[in-house]
Image (cartoon, rainbow, N blue to C red):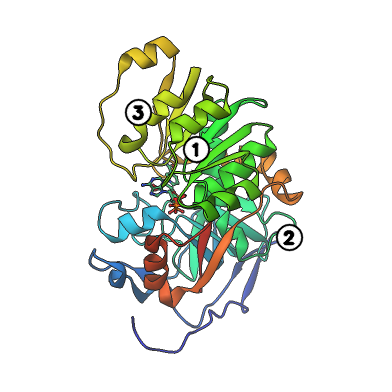
Amino acid sequence: MPARARRTPVVAAGVVHAGRRRRHVRPRVVPVRAVTVPEPGGPDALVVTDVPDPVPGPDQVVLAVAAAGVNRADLLERAGHYPSPPGAPPWPGLEVSGTVVAMGDDVVGWAVGDAACALLGGGGYAEQVAVDAGHLLPLPDGVDLVDGAALPEAVCTAWSNLVDVGRLRAGEHVLIHGGSGGVGSVAIQLAAALGAHVLTTAGGAERAARCRGLGATVAIDYRTQDVAAVVRDATGGRGVDVVLDVLGAGALATNLESLATEGRLVVIGLQRGRRAEIDLNVLMSKRAAVVGTTLRSRPAAQKTDLVAAVRAHVWPMVADGRVRPLVHARVPLDRAADAHRLLDSGEVFGKLLLVP
Ligand SMILES: NC(=O)c1ccc[n+]([C@@H]2O[C@H](COP(=O)([O-])OP(=O)(O)OC[C@H]3O[C@@H](n4cnc5c(N)ncnc54)[C@H](OP(=O)(O)O)[C@@H]3O)[C@@H](O)[C@H]2O)c1
């Protein structure tokens, strides 16, 4: 990482008015810095470098980044396995919070100076980033601008997969794997706020106890307990209506066993492998469904609809405190490599944030 003084972007000059709305704050007098990956590899493959100023398209805004969420997908991208989709900057960062500093001509409903957070296809590890206006969310009431970066990816993933795909309803039982993780810690709170009975898994008694504090009625230490047996006992032998699975192949048999009749298994992660045999007789006899999804690869219009649904349904829960961002640590953007090592260590509970 280059040893040089941290430079704060200068964005306060040259306000341009378009009608009554301020659309640009220009010119910048220092370049934008980003954490890029010139060659895939370990954490030290992350290199801070100057990148071109982001220019907003007609339907985009530019955010001065207050913080970027660190996601497990970023580790894969750094290692060369999960490139940014076309149109997104070729460096990591799936979510940010920040302040609007420039806007395209067709953007409505936003103004320069607004505090926001956003879902990105990539490029969040930077001092500035261009964002589709449809993927922007206002900073929720009561949430610190930096902590807002912990929300978009986890909330959109949890809402989409629990509600849209998993069709979770009040009174149903849901098993959320990885309750101590960035997605799981939000998914527990969201499912509890929706009125579901939440069962979850985490590594160790202390982490399981923290999951109970988030709203899980049953938190299973997967290192020492038999997950399927605990689920069976806790549901009177019936099983759960929905499983939100971040594990994949290694958990498939347990997940199918844990499903109730007409249960839905939603696979969103492959931390325990991608290939497994499935006993189709279990699926048939339970009339169960197995679905897999990824958020990043979805068309922009689908993400716009999802962000709108999150704003309508989840943002009120954030504003009244039922769903809170869980920030394990804030790490300076210059130390992104340390953040990746920390996430890999398994010590993180909730989210890590990079702060420019
Ligand atoms: N499909 C999508 O759209 C989408 C979106 C976001 C994330 N994801 C994926 O979802 C997964 C979780 O994301 P995240 O941000 O929550 O990651 P994270 O913050 O790193 O959390 C990982 C979670 O998985 C648990 N875990 C790890 N290895 C495990 C194992 N062998 N057995 C049981 N539990 C294990 C961890 O438990 P302990 O630390 O307590 O041991 C932790 O709760 C990642 O694979 C990510 O890529 C997918």
> SS at mark 3?
helix
Name above or below for residue 47 compared with residue 118.
below
Residue at 30% of width from left, 51% of height from top? 82
Residue 158 figure quarter: top right
Residue in the picture at 59% in, 51% down: 209
Q: Is residue 156 visible?
A: yes
Residue 306 location in percent, x, y? 56, 38
Looking at the picture, which amino acid does disc 1 mark?
Ala
Q: Which of the labelled discs sits on residue 301, or is there none?
A: 1
Position of 22 relative to 189 (above/below): below
Is the residue 88 above or below the residue 312 in the image? below
Q: Do the residues bearing badges 3 and 1 touch, measured as CB atoms within 8 Å?
A: no
The kind of residue on which mark 3 rests is: Ala
**What is the secondary structure assignment of the residue under circle 1?**
helix
The disc label shown at residue 20, or none: 2
Q: Amino acid at mark 2?
A: Arg
Residue behind mark 3: 253
Instruction: Determine the image quadrant of residue 142.
Output: bottom right
Q: Nearer the viewer, residue 233 or 111?
A: 233
Q: Looking at the image, tell me whether mark 2 or mark 1 is earlier in sequence order.
A: 2
Disc marking residue 48? none
Residue 242 visible (yes or no): no
Q: Is residue 73 left or right of residue 305?
A: left
Label 2 and label 3: CA atoms lie apart by: 59 Å
Please name whichever residue, 125 or 229, is drawn nearer the observer in this view of the structure: 229
Q: Secondary structure at mark 2?
A: loop
Residue 77 location (% of width, % of height): 31, 56
